[in-house]
Amino acid sequence: MAEKEPPGTTVVIHGGNYGPSSQQVVCPNCHNRVYTVVKAEVSRRTHIIVILLCVFLCWPCALIPYCIDSCKNKNHYCPSCGSYLGTYYN
């Protein structure tokens, strides 16, 4: 049975367990404890949604996925050194 973390303990996230919002991590590059900077960036999925909207004659709405963050990947970066930490895929 796993033990619970004591109050005030920070859990460090390594690998691909990032969420859609900023998270506290220890940067593997600069070793600072930081809250990640999240940038929503267009992905292949966003382009596919746009193409499908065009194919199904919804071309007036086709560019909307480029304006909606939920259609984009959330890339996490370290605010101290700017290194890429991971991505949250929708």
Image: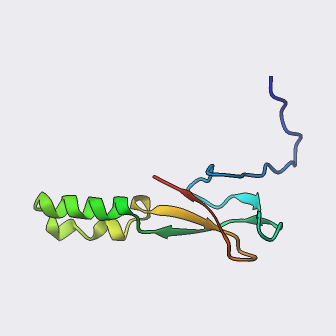
Residue 5: give x, y in percent of width and height: 85, 39
The percent position of residue 76, horizontal first and vertical second, equals 61, 65
| Residue displayed at 87% across by 49% down | 8
Which of 17/4 is in front? 17
| Quadrant in the picture for residue 88 | bottom right
Percent of width and height locating residue 71? 39, 60
Quarter of the picture holding the N terminus: top right
Q: Position of residue 66 (x, y in %)?
A: 35, 70
Q: Is the residue 1 above or below the residue 12 in the image?
A: above
Quadrant in the picture for residue 70: bottom left
Residue at 28% over, 60% down: 48
Q: Is residue 48 left or right of residue 85?
A: left
Quarter of the view holding residue 31: bottom right
**For residue 86, side relative to residue 66 (left or right):** right
Q: Is residue 85 left or right of residue 54?
A: right
Residue shown at the point (86%, 48%) measured from the top left: 9
Answer with left or right where residue 77 lies relative to residue 89.
Answer: right
Query: Farthest top residue?
Result: 1
User: Residue, x 44% and y 64% (percent of image)?
Assistant: 69
* Color scheme of the displayed model: rainbow
Q: How many marks?
A: 0
Q: Residue furthest left?
A: 57
